[in-house]
Amino acid sequence: MKRLSYEFVKEQFEKEGYELLSKEYVNNITKLDYICTKEHKHATTWNKFKDGVRCPHCSKYSNNYNIDGIKRSFENEGYILLSTNYVRAKAKLMCMCPNNHFYRVSWYEWNGHGSRCAECAVDKRRRNFGIIESSFVNEGYTLLTFKFEYRGGKQKLKYICNNGHKHSIRWDGWEAGNRCPSCFHARQSLIMSGHNHWNWKGGITPLMRSIRNDIKRSGWSQKVFKKDMYICQRCKDKKNNRLHAHHVIQFSSILSYYNITTIKESQECSLLYDINNGITLCKKCHKWVHSNKNIKNNYKVKEV
């Protein structure tokens, strides 16, 4: 980008009727002293000046506003300005709204941000509370938040669903279709469990978990660790203390080959408890063995 000249910057200030006092232009973030059209002396950077920033003393939030002009602005909206003195833009002014609520607001908030009576805004939200309440009742929910407690759309509303679950939700979330999370998870569990699940294998998970727990209680894992000197047999990291005992001939393959259907049958299968069929792996390596990255099926035999 081409570097601006001092003459160009000075010309831009003069177009606004400003007098540039600085004699040198360094860069766009170095402050330049100037005098505005009303003889106010100030400083700004070229970045701010080209973005429209001008003399703060002449801005619309300055003392150029008098109390009479501010009073007319309030009266145009049915408000009554009770303060008789205007100090600065962010100084609070006492006023009364059309519904006779007394409150304090600054000229900066009134004129710059459109702030109006907060109590009136709350009353308006409370008038709409009947719509919210009826929406909950129509779906069999009991709304626990009362009308006088409701402050706005971002407030969480407490409720009890038609199945007795107690939760809370924001009004915008309710309008978006969100309902009781406990009921949702219960429905999802029924939909995705048992024979409805894509990986359903006839209900063998409880049996497999029971057999695994029985193998752990037998001390098989510790015997495998001791055999391998408590060292991961893949990465050989001696300092890794997160060790797993892994069946080389896969656990599921053994159950399938010997047609094991009970704990007693598993206890009679010596291969499940054979430490020579076990190998010590760290957590990271054990995860790798069972992942798609193990293309050659190292440390894994699928057939007995």
Image (cartoon, rainbow, N blue to C red):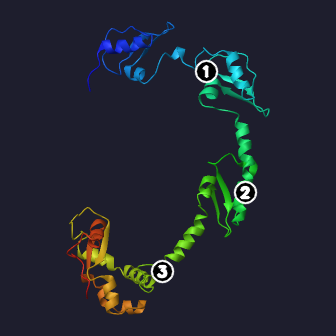
* 116 displayed left or right of 244: right
Q: Residue at x 72, y 26 (%)?
A: 76
Which circle's residue, 3 or 1, is located before the other in the chain?
1
Image coordinates of residue 120 in percent, x first then y, are 73, 38
Dots 2 and 3: beta carbons under 8 Å?
no
Say which amino acid is labelled 3: Asn
Q: Secondary structure at mark 1?
A: loop
Q: What's the mark number on residue 196? A: 3
On residue 133, which mark appears?
2
Amino acid marked by disc 2: Glu
Foreground residue among 193 and 215: 193
Residue lying at the far front in this picture: please name it.
15
CA gap between label 2 and label 3 equals 37 Å
What is the number of the mark on residue 120?
Answer: none
User: Which of 234/146 is in front?
Assistant: 146
Residue on which disc 1 sits: 89
Decide: few, some or many residues near mark 3? Use Cα within 10 Å; few <14, some 14-19, many ≥20. few
Task: Please determine whether, in this image, residue 149 is positioned above or below residue 167.
Answer: above
Secondary structure found at label 2: helix
